[in-house]
Structure formats: C-alpha cells, structure tokens
Amino acid sequence: MQLAAVVPAPFRAVAPAAAGEGQAQALLRGRRPSLSGALLFLSIGAFSAAVACRSRTGCAFSHRRFPFLGVRGLSSARMESASTTVPSIVVYVTVPNREAGKKLSQSIISEKLAACVNIVPGIESVYWWEGKVQTDAEELLIIKTRESLLDALTEHVKSNHEYDVPEVIALPITGGNTKYLEWIKNSTKEN
C-alpha cells in the first residue's frame, strides 16, 4: 500500500478523480469525490455507527446523533423509568481517615439519608486553606441518594464532620440501571 493511501484526506493534496475511477478509489487516492459520493460515504458511516451502538448496551451516542434510526439512549431510558424512580444524585464528601468515614457513613445510612456510601481510601487532596497550599491524605465518600435529600444530607454532614468546612458536592444521576435507581428510591426516606 502506498503512503498516500493511509494519510488522512485533510493532509493530502486534493486532485480530481481520474477518468473511470470510482468514488471509493478517489477517496483512497486523495482525490475529491462528487457530492453524491460524499453523501453516500457519510450515510454509510452514520448507519455503521448506529448499528455498532445498537449492539452494545447503554450507548446514548447513537440516539443523540441519529434519532431517526430509533436507537434508545440514556435520556429515553430515564423518561421510561420516571414513574418508578426519583431524581437521584451522587454526593462526594471527603473525610480525614477510615474511622471518620465509617462513622459518618453509618449515621447517613441509619438516618436513611442515602441508599449507599462507598468509602474510597488513598485520596490525596491538595487545596488552598488559610493562605497557603495544603496537602493531606483523605478518604472519599461516594454517596448515592435522592436529590430531594441533599439539604438534609448536607446539614447532617456539617453537624457530624470533623472539618470546619466539609466538602459536600452533588452531581446529578442522568441515567443508569433502572432497578438500581428504584433501589435508591426505596432505600431512602421521602422528603
């Protein structure tokens, strides 16, 4: 194979197709195809991407880019499950050590302020505090809960945390396993 055939088209010199040369050969040789050839090339690429995504689970790419192909994405999965789930969030809270993480996690779960808390060890935090850069070993709590419980959870963390200004950062859950999202709803208190 010649080097020109593997160099992407934007980086090759553009020349008209030779007489009798097909659109595919023109593309491979770096020549400009006709408009109909370009549209055919793009439509085959779009179809291939949609088919590839349809065979995998959880691919929202094809739904957003090619809604006319009828491929489901995360947004449609969320809409279908809206009646059995509630808006849910993931909340990050850092703690100074394992013991503090376990104590806070257990109180959060006992109060039904969250369905699950993961304790991730080995976090190193670098931050600005009291006029200088600080570095501390910490652990990260990843908390799954209802969006409606964020205020109560934040107050609980502030009341039961060793830090003057504890981290409480919430991120929306925009989709996922419907059964898991239902479990979050059923394992937490209503607010």
Image (tube, rainbow, N blue to C red):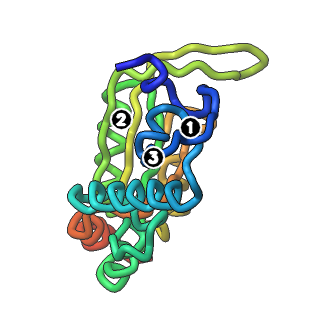
Q: Position of residue 34 (x, y in %)?
A: 57, 54
Find out whether the residues at labels 1 and 3 contact each other: C-beta distance under 8 Å: no
**Residue pointed to by mark 1:** 31
Mark 1 or mark 3, whichever is nearer to me = 3
Residue, x 43% and y 60% (percent of image)?
Answer: 173
Q: Nearer the viewer, residue 46 or 65?
A: 46
Q: Position of residue 70 (x, y in %)?
A: 35, 76
Precedes in sequence: disc 1 or disc 3: 3
Quadrant for the C terminus in the image? bottom left
Q: Nearer the viewer, residue 5 or 159?
A: 5
Q: Position of residue 90 (x, y in %)?
A: 43, 53
Q: Residues within 10 Å of mark 1 (few under 14, many from 20)?
A: some
Q: Looking at the picture, does residue 28 appear above or below residue 186?
A: above
Q: Looking at the picture, does residue 179 appear above or below residue 41?
A: below
Q: Looking at the picture, does residue 77 appear above or below residue 128?
A: below
Residue, x 29% and y 81% (percent of image)?
Answer: 84
Report the label total: 3
Q: Secondary structure at mark 3?
A: loop
Q: Which mark is residue 110?
A: none
Residue at mark 1 to residue at mark 3: CA–CA distance: 13 Å
Q: Is residue 27 left or right of residue 101?
A: right
Q: In the rendered structure, which amino acid carries the disc numbered 2?
A: Gly
Q: Position of residue 59 (x, y in %)?
A: 33, 57
Residue, x 38% and y 49% (percent of image)?
Answer: 143
Q: In the rendered structure, which amino acid carries the disc numbered 3?
A: Gly
